[in-house]
Image: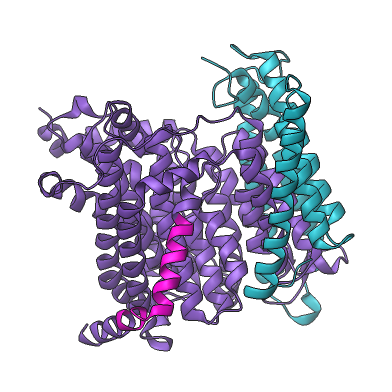
C-alpha cells in the first residue's frame, strides 16, 4: 500500500503522534487560559455561567481526545522516524515544492500586495506570475516561452479588469 | 397546509418572472460549473456567492445561493463520471459506477441518468422539506436551553461519527476544534472578550465566511496545485436523454434513495456525502444485480446521485427549523439567511410563515434548472473540464480574497482565510473531515449560550439537562453514539444484545 499519509500508514501514524501531542498542549493551554478568565463574582454571576466555563470544558475535551490520539499513535510506533512503505521520495519532494510555491504566491498576493498596491495591479501581477511559474517548462523552445508569457499576460489583464469591473460595478463590493 | 400551498404557489409565480428566471439560470449554471471542477466545492461556491450577493434583496440572494448549492452538488457528477474524480466530495459514490460506464462507452447515458436522478432526488427532498419543516418547527417550540445544548452536542458527535466512519476520533477532534474556534471573541452573555488579548480584530471573533472560504477554497487550491495534474476529458459519446423505461425500472431506487438522502441531510453536519453513500449501500443491498455494483451499475449511479441531491433540501430542514445546519454548504446558507435579516429557528413559522414555502419553491426552481441545463448543456459543459488548473486556480484565489474581504471590509478576514486555508490543508492531509469543523464553528455559540442559560435557569444544577424529557432523549442518543464508537463498549453491548432471547430466536 502506498503511504499517502492516511490512517494506518507510517506517515499517518507519525502525523497522528505529533498532532496528538499538539492537541494535548493546545487543550491544556486552553483549559489554563479559561481558568484564568474572570469569574465575575463581583457582578453576582453564578460560577456555572462564567465566561471561561465552556472554553475550559472544550479545552479538557481536546486534551482528552488529543491524548487518546497520541497514545494510540505512540503504541503503533509513531515516535519512530523514517519513511513510510511505498513512499516515492522524488514524488514527495515535487509535491512539497509545488505546495510551497503555491502557498508563497498566494500569501504574497493576499497578505503582501493586496492593500499595498491598487487591487487591479496586484491581481494582474499575481495571475501572471502564478500561470508563468506553474506552466514553465525548461524543454520549451524560446518561441514557446514567448507564447506562454503572452497568453499569461493576456489572461492576467482580462481577469484583473473583469474582476475589478464586475465586483465594483455589478456586485457593488468594496475591493481591498 | 392549504395556507402553505398558497405561499408555495405565490412563490412559484414570483419565480416565473424573467428576472428570477435569469437568476436561476446563471446561478445554477455557475453552480454546475463549480461542482464540475475538481477542487471547487459546493461550500466554497455558496460562501463566495454569499459575500457577493449580500447587497441584493433577501429573496433574490437566497434563491441564487440555493441554485448554486443544488447545481454544485449535481455538477460534481460530471467529473466523477468522466474523470473518476468527484467534483465535490458528495459525488464520490457516483464515480464508482459512473466511471466504469463512461469507460464502456456509455458516458452520455450515465450523464443523462445522473441528471434525472439528481432532479428526482431534489424533488423528493423538496416534498419532504415542505412536509417535515413546519411539523419540526412546531415541535422545536418545546425546545429550551437544555435541549439546544444537547442538539448542538449531538450535531458534533453524529457529524464526527458519520463523516469519519473509519476513525470517529478524527471526526470528533475536528468538531471540537470547530467549537473552540467559535469561542474566540466577545461572548454573548457577559460580553467578555475571550482569547482576544486586547486585539480588536480577535475580539470580533473569526468570521464564518472567511474561515470557510479558507478551509474550502484556499486549502483546495493548495491541494490541487500540490498534486499531479488530472487528465482532461473525452466526449460524452452516446445518447444523453434517458429512456422512460430506464427511469421506470429504477423508480424504487429513486424513491428509496430520495428518502434516505433527505434523512441523512436532516442529521446535523452529515450532509450530501453520507446521503450518497447510504443510498448507494441501501441500493446494493436491495439489488438483484449486486455483482454489477462498482463495475458500472445504473442502479448504483442513480442511487448515489439521487441520494446526494435529496440531502440538499434535507439539510435545509434543520437550518430553517432549528438554525442548525445539516451540511457544510447549509451552514453557509444559514449564515446568509442571518445576513439578510431572516431568523431561522423554531419561531420561523410564526415570524416568517411564508418563508419555508418560498424556500421549497426555490428548491423546485433550482431542480428544474439542473434538469434543463444538465440535459441541454451536457456536451458544451464538458469544455469546462478542459480548463487547466494553472489557469483556473489563481482566478479562484482572487475570488477567495475578495470574498473574505467583502462582507466586513476587514483585512483581518483575509488573514483568517489564509490561516484557515493552511490549517484546513493540513487537516485534510491527515484525513480529518471538514464538515464537523464547520459545524463546530456554527454551533459553538449555540452550545455555549444555551449551556450557560440552562445553568442560570437551574441555579447551577446540571439535573435538568438529564431530566427534561426531550433533553434526556437527546442526551441518551448523544452518549450512545459515543459509547458505540468505542470498540470494547460496542462489543459488550452487542454481546449483551445477542444474549437476549428474542434476538437469539431471530437468528437463522
At 35% from the left edge and 83% from the top edge, which residue is drawn?
Answer: B14
In which quarter of the view is residue B184 placed?
A: bottom right
Residue found at the very far front of the displayed protein: A143
Depth check, front residue: A143 or A166 = A143
Look at the image and tell me whether residue B507 can be seen: yes
Report if residue B18 lies within the magenta region: yes
Whether residue B44 is situated above or below residue B423 in the rendered picture: below
Please state the extent of the stretch shown in magenta in the rendering.
B12-31
Locate residue A123, reporting x and y percent.
77, 55
Q: Mainly helix, strand or loop, the magenta region?
A: helix
Q: Is residue B214 left or right of residue B469?
A: right
Chain coloured cyan:
A
Q: Is residue A10 magenta?
A: no
- Please say if A29 is above or below B465: above
What colouring style does the render use? by chain
Q: Residue at position x 36%, y 78% from top?
A: B15
Q: Quadrant of the C terminus of chain A?
A: bottom right
Q: Position of residue B175 (x, y in %)?
A: 57, 50
Residue in the foreground of this view, choosing between B138 and B32? B32
Residue at 56% over, 35% down:
B431
Judge whether A24 appears above or below B62 on screen.
Answer: above
Residue B196, given in percent of the width and then of the height, sits at 82, 63
* Residue B271 visible in this rendered orientation of the protein: no
Q: Is residue A97 left or right of residue B387?
A: right
Q: How many numbered markers are drawn? A: 0
Q: Is residue B309 left or right of residue B186?
A: left
**In the figure, what tint was chain B given?**
purple
- Residue B306 coordinates in the image, percent (x, y): 28, 50
Amino acid at each position: 500500500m502506498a503511504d499517502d499519509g492516511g490512517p494506518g500508514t507510517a506517515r499517518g501514524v507519525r502525523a497522528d503522534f505529533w498532532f496528538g501531542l499538539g492537541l494535548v498542549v493546545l487543550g491544556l493551554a486552553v483549559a489554563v487560559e479559561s481558568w484564568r478568565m474572570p469569574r465575575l463574582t463581583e457582578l453576582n454571576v453564578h460560577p456555572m455561567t462564567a465566561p471561561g466555563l465552556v472554553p475550559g470544558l472544550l479545552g479538557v475535551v481536546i486534551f482528552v481526545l488529543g491524548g487518546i490520539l497520541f497514545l494510540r499513535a505512540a503504541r503503533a510506533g509513531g515516535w519512530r522516524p523514517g519513511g513510510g512503505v511505498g513512499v516515492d521520495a522524488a514524488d514527495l519532494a515535487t509535491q512539497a515544492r509545488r505546495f510551497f510555491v503555491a502557498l508563497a504566491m498566494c500569501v504574497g498576493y493576499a497578505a503582501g500586495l493586496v492593500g499595498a498596491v491598487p487591487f487591479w495591479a496586484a491581481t494582474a501581477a499575481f495571475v501572471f506570475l502564478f500561470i508563468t511559474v506553474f506552466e514553465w517548462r525548461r524543454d520549451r523552445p524560446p518561441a514557446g516561452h514567448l507564447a506562454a508569457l503572452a497568453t499569461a499576460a493576456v489572461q492576467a489583464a482580462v481577469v484583473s479588469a473583469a474582476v475589478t469591473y464586475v465586483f465594483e460595478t455589478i456586485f457593488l463590493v468594496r475591493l481591498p | 397546509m392549504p395556507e402553505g400551498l398558497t405561499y408555495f404557489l405565490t412563490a412559484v409565480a414570483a419565480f416565473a418572472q424573467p428576472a428570477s428566471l435569469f437568476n436561476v439560470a446563471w446561478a445554477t449554471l455557475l453552480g454546475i460549473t463549480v461542482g464540475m471542477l475538481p477542487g471547487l466545492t459546493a461550500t466554497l461556491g455558496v460562501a463566495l456567492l454569499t459575500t457577493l450577493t449580500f447587497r441584493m434583496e433577501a429573496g433574490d440572494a437566497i434563491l441564487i445561493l440555493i441554485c448554486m448549492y443544488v447545481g454544485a452538488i449535481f455538477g460534481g457528477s460530471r467529473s466523477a463520471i468522466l474523470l473518476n474524480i468527484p467534483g465535490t466530495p458528495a459525488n464520490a459514490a457516483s464515480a464508482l459506477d459512473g466511471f466504469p460506464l463512461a469507460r464502456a462507452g456509455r458516458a452520455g447515458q450515465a450523464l443523462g441518468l445522473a441528471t434525472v436522478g439528481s432532479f428526482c432526488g431534489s424533488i423528493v427532498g423538496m416534498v419532504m422539506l415542505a412536509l417535515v419543516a413546519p411539523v419540526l418547527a412546531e415541535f422545536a417550540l418545546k425546545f429550551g436551553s437544555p435541549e439546544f445544548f444537547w442538539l448542538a452536542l449531538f450535531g458534533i458527535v453524529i457529524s464526527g461519527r458519520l463523516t469519519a466512519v473509519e476513525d470517529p476520533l478524527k471526526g470528533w477532534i475536528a468538531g471540537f476544534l470547530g467549537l473552540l474556534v467559535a469561542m474566540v471573541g466577545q461572548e454573548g452573555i457577559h460580553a467578555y472578550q475571550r482569547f482576544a488579548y486586547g486585539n480588536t480584530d480577535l475580539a470580533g471573533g473569526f468570521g464564518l465566511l472567511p474561515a470557510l472560504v479558507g478551509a474550502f477554497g484556499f486549502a483546495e487550491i493548495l491541494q490541487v496545485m500540490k498534486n499531479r495534474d488530472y487528465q482532461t476529458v473525452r466526449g460524452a459519446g452516446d445518447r444523453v436523454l434517458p429512456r422512460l423505461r430506464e427511469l421506470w425500472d429504477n423508480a424504487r431506487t429513486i424513491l428509496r434513495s430520495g428518502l434516505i438522502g433527505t434523512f441523512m441531510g436532516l442529521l446535523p453536519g452529515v450532509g450530501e456525502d453520507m446521503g450518497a453513500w447510504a443510498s448507494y449501500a441501501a441500493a446494493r443491498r436491495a439489488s438483484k444485480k449486486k455483482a454489477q455494483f462498482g463495475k458500472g451499475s445504473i442502479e448504483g449511479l442513480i442511487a448515489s446521485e439521487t441520494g446526494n441531491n435529496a440531502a440538499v433540501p434535507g439539510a435545509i430542514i434543520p437550518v430553517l427549523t432549528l438554525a442548525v445546519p445539516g451540511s457544510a454548504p447549509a451552514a453557509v446558507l444559514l449564515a446568509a439567511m442571518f445576513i439578510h435579516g431572516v431568523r431561522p429557528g423554531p419561531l420561523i413559522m410564526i415570524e416568517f410563515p411564508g418563508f419555508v414555502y418560498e424556500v421549497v419553491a426555490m428548491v423546485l426552481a433550482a431542480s428544474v434548472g439542473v434538469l434543463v441545463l444538465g440535459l441541454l448543456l451536457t456536451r458544451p459543459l464538458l469544455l469546462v473540464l478542459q480548463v487547466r488548473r494553472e489557469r483556473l486556480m489563481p482566478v479562484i484565489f482572487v475570488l477567495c480574497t475578495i470574498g473574505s474581504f467583502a462582507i466586513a471590509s476587514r483585512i483581518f478576514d483575509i488573514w483568517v482565510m489564509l490561516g484557515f486555508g493552511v490549517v484546513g490543508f493540513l487537516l485534510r492531509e491527515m484525513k480529518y473531515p471538514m464538515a464537523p469543523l464547520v459545524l463546530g464553528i456554527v454551533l459553538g455559540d449555540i452550545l455555549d449560550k444555551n449551556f450557560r442559560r440552562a445553568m442560570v435557569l437551574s441555579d447551577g444544577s446540571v439535573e435538568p439537562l438529564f431530566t427534561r424529557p426531550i433533553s434526556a432523549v437527546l442526551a441518551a442518543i448523544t452518549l450512545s453514539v459515543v459509547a458505540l464508537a468505542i470498540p470494547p463498549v460496542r462489543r459488550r453491548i452487542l454481546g449483551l444484545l445477542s444474549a437476549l432471547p428474542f434476538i437469539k430466536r431471530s437468528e437463522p
